[in-house]
Image (tube, grey):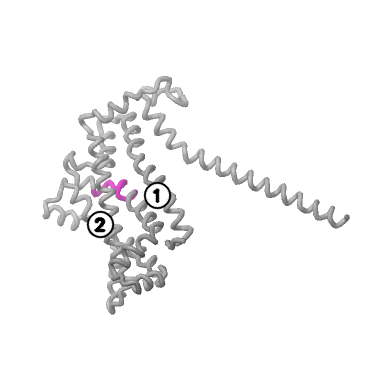
Amino acid sequence: MATSSTGALHRRPRARRGRAGTVGVYVAASVAAVLFLVPFYLLVRNSLATDADLTGAHWTFFPTTLHWENISELFDDPAVPMAHSIYNSLVVGVVGTSGQLLICSLGGYALARIPYRHANKIFYAVLATLMIPSAVTFIPSFVLVSSLGWVSTLRGLIVPGLFSGFTAFLFRQYFLGFPKELEEAAQLDGLGPWRVYWRIVVPNSRGFFAAIAVITFVTNWNAFLWPLVIGQDQSSWTVQVALSTFTTAQTINIHELFLAATVSILPLVFVFLFLQRYLVEGVAHTGVKG
């Protein structure tokens, strides 16, 4: 009896410590969630206010009157083609991400699987491109795009970014760890290299492809300097270039700037929510189904 009583006494403090730890985790997660959501709250609040509300002396949690007409004002603004800029960014993001996934995954798979005596040299050449600062290649890239007549076109925005040495490196490292048994079994069933890649490797690597897709899409969507230089006409502006036009040396359209920023992050939120399951799956299964 004494032994059982002593064990119960030892278990109670451990149970209390376990409950306290769980409560602490929830409190920390709640605080982190609130801090994470504060910028989104400020975007929404300022988007539906007037410039007078934003520059007033007294702070209010939300404006007394929510100005939903700001949305139509944003998209009807003749100086900033916001709707067309969002369309351009979607095209650049989707096409650029798809092209980079295709080209870099094929390059990484070739470097990891094709027995070629110069494969390591090519791999080191790809790595060498990562050591070249982007500022060094910016002007030659612009001269090349300009000579092709691609200034103020979506081709000029998309094509130069279709290959990334870093993305090819990531794919190569991933495919080195991909189980060869799956590929060998497919080859025994009569599948050639292309069909092995498309029917075995890609479907079993959805998580990794999704992770790279999110990173690439966000990078393309948030790009500013290259679209600013190439998109010299309003018809080729991306959303980031359009956002910059709300702040000029003469005027600052505050409420439209906040509303445009709110609208511009919505596609990124949808991309993350849609691909979140695949990201978790990729981390949990390292690209191998079942």
Percent of width and height locating residue 74:
28, 29
Percent of width and height locating residue 138:
22, 55
Percent of width and height locating residue 187:
34, 73
Identity of the residue drawn at 26% across and 52% down: 96
In the drawing, what numbered circle is on residue 194?
A: none
Chain part drawn in magenta: 218-226
Q: Is residue 44 above or below residue 168?
A: above
Identity of the residue drawn at 34% across and 53% down: 213
Amino acid type, label 1: Leu
Query: Residue under circle 1?
Result: 275
Farthest residue, direction right:
1
Q: Is residue 28 above or below residue 196?
A: above
Magenta portion: prevailing SS class = helix
Left or right placement of residue 94 versus residue 10 in this view: left
Q: Residues within 10 Å of mark 1 (few under 14, many from 20)?
A: some
Residue 224 shown in magenta: yes
In the drawing, what numbered circle is on residue 162?
A: 2
